[in-house]
Image (spheres, rainbow, N blue to C red):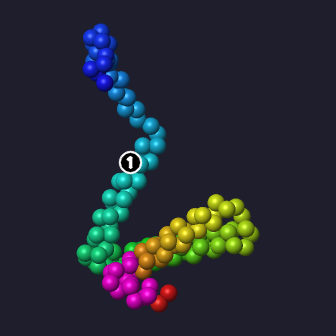
Amino acid sequence: MKENLTPEEQIAVEEEPTPPRKKFEWKNEYYAWVLAIIALLIGGIGIYQRFAFELRPTDLGSFVPWGLWVSTYEYLVWLEVGSLIVFTLLVYVFKVGSNFSKISRILYISALAILSMAFNLDRAGPGTSIPVLACF
């Protein structure tokens, strides 16, 4: 295509300036991403300690850590149950919006993931909770 151009046009095409790069601007939503990544890293360290050292880091012989452990387990279980009940009622009983029915599969998968997290953290590890989940 450049062969069909006159010499003046070829010079004009070759000298076209490249558009300037867009300057990076820090947005407020980046704070949330940074905090989420830090929280995931800290949580990953905790999960590693739970599976690598079992219950030794939790010191479940003491009352306070044992209470925190039980409350975390209860929170995960009731979070899963509550989300299932709310969305099942909204979608199937009250027939609220088609948007909820689109996300119902994601809800059920996430509820199963939360349930498996609760079992995995409460039991000795992932291998011991598989027979329990198989009963459902």
The residue lying toward the viewer, choosing from 102 and 18, is 18
Q: Residue furthest right?
A: 94
Residue drawn at the location 58% of the way across and 64% of the way down: 103
Q: Is residue 61 visible?
A: no
The residue to which callout 1 is attached is 34
Residue 108 image offset from top left, x and y in percent: 54, 72
Residue 73 image offset from top left, x and y in percent: 46, 76
Dominant SS of magenta comes to: helix
Q: Is residue 124 magenta?
A: yes
Residue 133 image offset from top left, x and y in percent: 44, 85
**Disc 1 residue type?**
Val
Q: Residue furthest left?
A: 52
When the figure is inspected, residue 64 is found, relative to residue 17, above or below; the finding is below
Residue drawn at the location 28% of the way across and 21% of the way down: 2
Q: Residue furthest top?
A: 8
When the figure is inspected, residue 110 is found, relative to residue 130, above or below; the finding is above
The residue carrying pointer 1 sits among few (fewer than 14), some (14 to 19) or many (20 or more) residues within 10 Å by Cα, namely few
What range of the chain is rendered magenta? 120-134
Residue drawn at the location 63% of the way across and 66% of the way down: 101
Q: Is residue 33 visible?
A: yes
The residue lying toward the viewer, choosing from 114 and 103, is 103
Residue 69 image offset from top left, x and y in percent: 42, 75
Residue 47 image-quadrant placement: bottom left
Residue 9 image-quadrant placement: top left
Q: Quick one: quadrant of the N terminus? A: top left
Residue drawn at the location 74% of the way across and 69% of the way down: 94
